[in-house]
Structures are given as structure tokens and as C-alpha cells.
Image: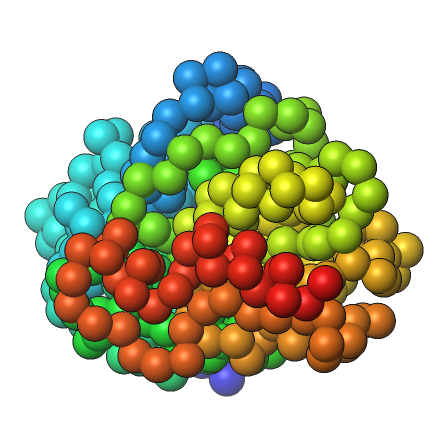
Amino acid sequence: MVGAGSKGAAARAAWEARLAALPAAKQAEFTRAFAGELPEKLGNALRRYKKSLVEDAPKVATRKASEMTLAVINPIMTETLGGSADLTGSNNTKTGDMGIFTPENRKGRYIHYGIREHGMAAAMNGMALHGGVRPYGGTFFTFTDYARPSMRLSALMGINVVYVMTHDSIGVGEDGPTHQPVEHLAMMRATPNCLVMRPADAVETLECWEIALSQPNRPSVLALTRQNLPTLRSKNVSRNLAAQGAYVLAEAEGKRQVILMATGSEVEIAMDARAKLQAEGIGTRVVSMPSMELFAEQDEAYRKRVLPAGPVRIAVEAAVRQPWDRWLLGERGREAKAGFVGMNSFGASAPAEVLYEHFGITADAVVAEAKARL
């Protein structure tokens, strides 16, 4: 062992000399990156950007909102190293400041992995274990089937890798059921030490990126839409509400009789259903739940405030019901007063709006389910 150590002594000394020769600011940046700490100015930059999102209220897919947020993050957090498994144009994971990493350009910060989901995830694990870089990579959410062995190891080893999983529901439309991930949210939520986040708009997408970068010992999965979504958050933007896992997006007017819970693209449907129920005098609260894991980590008092006993509870998600029963039934809920509007089969090939109508994931279906439980 002494011989093995002395064999690399000269290379180590040369490396230390190069580090010591750097300006103090560069040394501090190197130390910060290897410590896994976020740059001090990142928080302010994200707060300014969030304010602009509320003012502009863009209607964009959350995959695009992710790219827009990365355009703020990547120039400041220069240790990010992005990539995609042959789907860069669809995953929106490359920003303009990133060169392509190649054998000839080792300064590039973006990797074209090719159609190698498992290999991409494995490579990102290695980078995270080495330290000094923050790897993130994208593919279609349904292709977690290929990446899952390495994604499971990310969680098992407790390392900060970010998986940007786009085309997150039957909303991918004409790509058909092979590309429509109806069971994958349940699969990833069932993985211990894995943080799954499905934002509802551009504001939540920014918040989810901020959360993902702040995780010291677990990977994050961002489930992002192909289809455009309106900006729903216009209040309480000074705090990262997504960090609470779930929060009240819209309060009931009058007596609270119904609580609608939803994630991602279905939060818009829940808001439309609320308007219809309120028009009939049925007080309805909408809870956006971008992360079940983060909500479960909140104290019981907060969870009770968001999901109090009494009102009918309806969950809306274009995926299978499996992970929802804890919030529908397990915490003071009752079967007779709980319903689910979502999927119980594979999808089909058709435009997104046709599929949502066909599978009954609509505001009218939510209204009917809620009224049936009252």
C-alpha cells in the first residue's frame, strides 16, 4: 500500500501546485463545488426570475419551463453537467452557454449520451460520487424502464443526481401507449430515498429545480409535460411552496365541502372543476401536490391544515391511483368520501385533448365524482 501511494505522489503534488496557483476566488469556487454547496447569488437570481414569471404568466410546457430555469441556473452554477439520451430537442436540457463535451472539448458541459438511458444514469452516478460536478440528464419518462437500475442505485447510494423526465403522461398524444407513462409515477414514488416532483406550471418548475439542487443525499426526478400549461401561481411567490410538497393553491369560497388534489397538468383541470363546483355553491379547495415525499415529511399539523378531515377528497392525475390512497384514505379520509379521476389502463394514440376526454380526465368528470361523494 505504501508503494501504491508513493507511486502517485508526484502527480498529486503537481495537482496541488496547480490548484494553489489559481486566484483565491477560483480556489473558493472549486472548494464550494466539491462541497456540494450552492452559489450564494443563485438564490437571488431565482427569486428575480420567479417574480418575472408571475408578471409574464407564460403558457409553456413544464419541459420548456425547466429549460428556462436552467438558463438562469447554468451560467451561475458552472459545475452543472447536463445531457440527454438522444432527446435533447425534446427534453430541453441544453442551454446556450453549454458547449458539447467531446474527446476534443473537455470543457464542454453537455453530453450527447445516445440512446443509452441506463448508461447515462450510470455515468451520472459516477460523476456525483466523484464530486465537483452536478449531473443532470433527460429522457422520456416512460424510458425510466431502461434507466431504472441506475436510478435505483442513485437512491440506494444517496447521491444528488437530477433526472429530467419529460412527456410525463398520456398528454404525449400521438406517440401512443408505448410512450405514455401511466404507471411510472407510482414506480418512482415507491422507490425509497427518491424525490419525485411533478410541477404544475413554470413557477412550480423553478421551485422544483431549486429543491432538486439542494438535496444532499438523494436523487430527484422531475416529471415534466410535453403540452403547454398556464401559469397558475400568482400569490405567495416569495416562498418556495413546492418545498412543502403540497399547498393550498385556491381556497374554498363559503363552506368547504370538497378538496381537489392534483399534480402537474391535472392541476389546471382541478382549477376548472373548482370553478364549476363553486358556481353551484359547493365550496371547493384545490391543493397542488408537486411532491408526495416532501408532503409526507411535513409535520402532522401542516398536513392537517392542508387536508383537514370532513370534506370530500378527490385526486386527479393522469396516471394510476396507487400512490394516492394515503392522502385519500389513510389520513382521516373515508372510502365513501374519497374518489380518484385518472387512469386504470394503458393509454392510446390520439391528440392529448382527445385522450383526456376519452379517458374521462376532465373538469366535468371531477365535478361528477365530487358531487357523487357529497
| Horizontal and vertical percent position of residue 296 | 73, 64
The residue closer to the viewer here, 326 or 48, is 326
The residue closer to the viewer here, 328 or 32, is 328
Q: Residue at x 37, y 39 (%)?
A: 229
Quadrant in which residue 329 is drawn: bottom right
Q: Is residue 8 at all visible to an observer of this figure?
A: no
101, above or below 318, in the image: above
60, above or below 167, in the image: above
Q: Residue at x 72, y 79 (%)?
A: 335
- Residue extending furthest right? 301
Q: Is residue 306 at all visible to an observer of this figure?
A: yes
| Horizontal and vertical percent position of residue 13 | 44, 52
300 left or right, relative to 324: right
Q: Residue at x 34, y 68 (%)?
A: 359
The residue closer to the viewer here, 279 or 291, is 279
12 left or right, relative to 194: left
